[in-house]
Image (cartoon, rainbow, N blue to C red):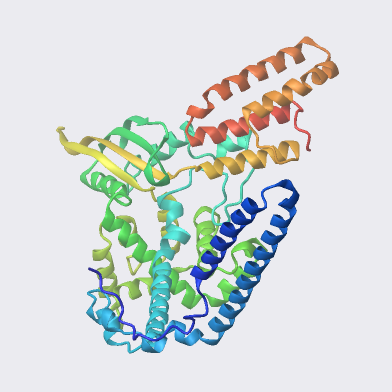
Amino acid sequence: MEKKPIVEEKKNPLEGIIDPEKIKIALEFIKKYRAILKEFFGDKEHERAVIVVGAILSLCVLGYSITQMILQNQALTKETNNLENLDKYSMQILKDGVWSKNIGNTSVNIADLLKVNESIKEETKRYEDHKTELQSSYTNFLQYFLVPKLNIRKEAYTDKLNLNLVGEKFLEQNPFNDINLYQKWSNFFSSTEKNQVNSIENLEIGDITETEYGLYGIKISFSFVTPSKNALLFLADKISISSDKENISLLWEFVYYLRQQIKNDKVASIEKLKADPDNKEIADNEDKVIGKELYKWVYGEGGSPLIDDKTINKTIKNIMECGTENESECFYKFRDKFRNIAEIAYTIGSETNVNKTDDLKMFFKNMPPLMTVQNFTFDKKENAKLIDSTITYAGKVELSIYGQNITAEDIAEIARSLGKKCFGNEDWLSAELAMSVIEKNGPSQQGKEGNSNSISRISDLKATLEDISKWYPEMNNYKKTIRLFEIYRMLNEGWFCTTI
């Protein structure tokens, strides 16, 4: 049986003041004698007397109850400390407990327990703050590269929805359309160091699929021929950057120390960025301000006031805890530690490199998203010639890349925002809403134009919306957002939107 805390017995100060049984007996008394009175004066002539007597008895009981409540309240107010028994509470049960004995052995009474509780709260807060600090490298920077958002209309860092990214502009800027995907990954797998180029063939890119944990996945497969062993190793390194857990850990470590060095070296620049109107919404989060500036630096033109070769060199020395030892030895250790990420180890890791800032920028710009490799096979091929002989490698790769999927909340926000943009109210845009608007306003549109082309155009628009409505529930979230913007574009171009 579970042990209960041992509390020193003390006479209850309320004993005798409140007696619930008395109230129960009084109610029974009323019922009993009301029945007797009713039976005795059973005729209609005396019915009023029965009611009067019953009312008097009820008032007596009510007065008794109110008096008892007042006495009870006074007693509780006067005897609060005795009711809690804090000073007399036995700590033995805590000392005997497996999980609580450490606390019990250092506590004499409840007051000590309260102090221990406050100490635990402070320790928990320190732990949470430290965890947030460690996660900042990912949450405020790396996540935008390792798990890029599928919802490209959501601005990085501010999460503002860009409703103007429609039509040709969307096709040009959307990295997930077929043309852009093929171009990006063909260039990524074919490029190597020393101006060599891998031959990429049979490149196949699958559909965007929704996966667990709020991620999307895209399957990619291709065949390749590399012109040299170094080119093959370079291809393997590029694929392993974001598919190997140790490499991802190294990336986190590098960004963590880089961010710390920026905080130490660039105080004035950080304060200036925090005061920038463009950073108004995130000004109270210094780590987010730094991350946003670095993100703009990677994908923008020119440099950034937060990063330069000097800051990068200090970061490398802090990572390796070099101290006063020889600089060449320090950079050698860094290259050895980061050797599996060749594009970092042998560029910024070289002490003689005077172009580290641009090299680091190029690395982040070309860094692949999180991926898993299902297959990577190759064979060596020798091409014998009379004058020269070369060795090439041919193989096949199957992998999947991942990122942040579009959520149901994202779709709701888009539908609500487009509805307001089109109609100026709180109606959520949908194919059904669009069809009802056309049904209502279509005849007036036909009357304005007064020709068969208008009738045909509206008929085609209805057919398109009916088709979207039919298949919409089965679409993935990415395609749903595309259809919502298509519906808005069709309504806007057809002059069915009521806002300008």
Q: Residue at x 52, y 41 (%)?
A: 408
User: Is residue 33 visible to the viewer in this orientation of the structure?
Assistant: yes
- Name the quadrant of the C terminus: top right
Q: Is residue 31 above or below residue 469?
A: below
Q: Residue at x 34, y 75 (%)?
A: 318
Q: Quarter of the image for the N terminus: give it.
A: bottom left
Tell which of 281 and 398 is nearer to you.
Answer: 281
Q: Quadrant of residue 483?
A: top right
Q: Quadrant of residue 56?
A: bottom right
From the viewer's perspective, is residue 294 above or below residue 263? Answer: above
| Position in image of residue 433 (x %, y %) | 67, 29
Q: Is residue 83 left or right of residue 323?
A: right
Give the side of residue 392 with respect to residue 422, left or right.
left
Classify 245 as above or below 99. above
The extreme top residue here reads: 452
How many numbered marks are there? 0
Where is residue 316? Give x, y as percent: 35, 71
Quarter of the view holding residue 108: bottom left
Q: Nearer the viewer, residue 260 or 384?
A: 260
Is 295 placed left or right of 104 in the picture? Answer: right
User: 21 and 239: which one is in front?
Assistant: 21
| Up-down relation of residue 458 to residue 333 (above or below) | above
Lateral position of residue 439 relative to residue 27, left or right: right
Q: Is residue 304 visible?
A: no
Observer-nearest residue: 60 or 41?
41
x and y percentages locating residue 192 in the rendered image: 32, 46
**Residue pictured at 44% horizontal, 36% vertical:** 181
Residue at horizontal 29 percent and vertical 73 percent from the top = 320
Instruction: State the image coordinates of residue 299 (x, y, percent, origin top left).
Output: 51, 53
